[in-house]
Image (spheres, grey):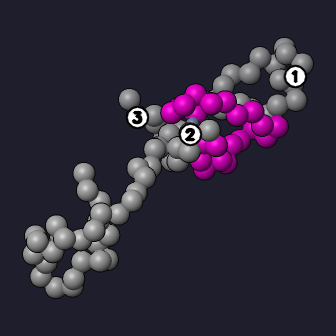
Amino acid sequence: MRLIDADKLPTGIIFPEEVNQTPTEDAVLVQHGKWEAIKLDKANSFNELLGGGWKCSECGDEVYLVTDTIDHNYCSNCGAKMDLKEAIQ
Ligand SMILES: [Zn+2]
């Protein structure tokens, strides 16, 4: 796959040669994931202080917070954008 910036193409009718001559851009594919809730053992005294735990669906990194919701848009471990409702199989 070769990625190009469409804004660098000429306006109007575009010929295949013009697309082929447009330089390739550096780009990083965005990895998508979701936070999966971790069931906390409330019998553990440390867990009593926590509101919740979540695991990244992509790398398995775990995040524990004193709040019962997580609003982190990205996984700080793998960089996945946490915008999936269901994990990709
Ligand atoms: Zn991750």
Q: Residue furthest top?
A: 43
Query: What type is the residue that disc 3 sits on?
Result: Ile
Q: Residue at x 51, y 33 (%)?
A: 58
Per the image, the residue denoted by label 2 is 78
Relative vertical location of residue 48 with respect to residue 68 in this rendering, above or below: above
Q: Which residues are magenta?
A: 56-76
Badge 2: residue crowd in 10 Å (few <14, some 14–19, many ≥20): some
On residue 25, the disc is none
Tag nearer the camera, 2 or 3 = 2
Quadrant of the rendering where the C terminus is positioned:
top left
Q: Secondary structure at mark 3?
A: loop
Mark-to-mark CA distance, 3 and 1: 32 Å
Mark closer to the chain start, 2 or 3: 2
- Residue 60 lies in quadrant: top right
State yes or no: Cβ of the residue under disc 2 lies below 8 Å from any atom of ligand 1.
Answer: yes
User: Which is closer to the viewer, label 2 or label 1?
Assistant: 2
Kind of residue at disc 2: Cys
Is the stretch drawn in magenta largely helix, strand or loop? loop
Residue in the image at 32% along x and 70% along y: 5
Q: Nearer the viewer, residue 78 or 20?
A: 20
* Mark closer to the chain start, 2 or 1: 1
Which amino acid lies under the numbered mark 1 shown in the image of this protein?
Phe
In percent of width and height, residue 46 lies at 87, 22
Residue 35 rendering spot, x and y as whole percentages? 59, 36
Q: Secondary structure at mark 2?
A: loop
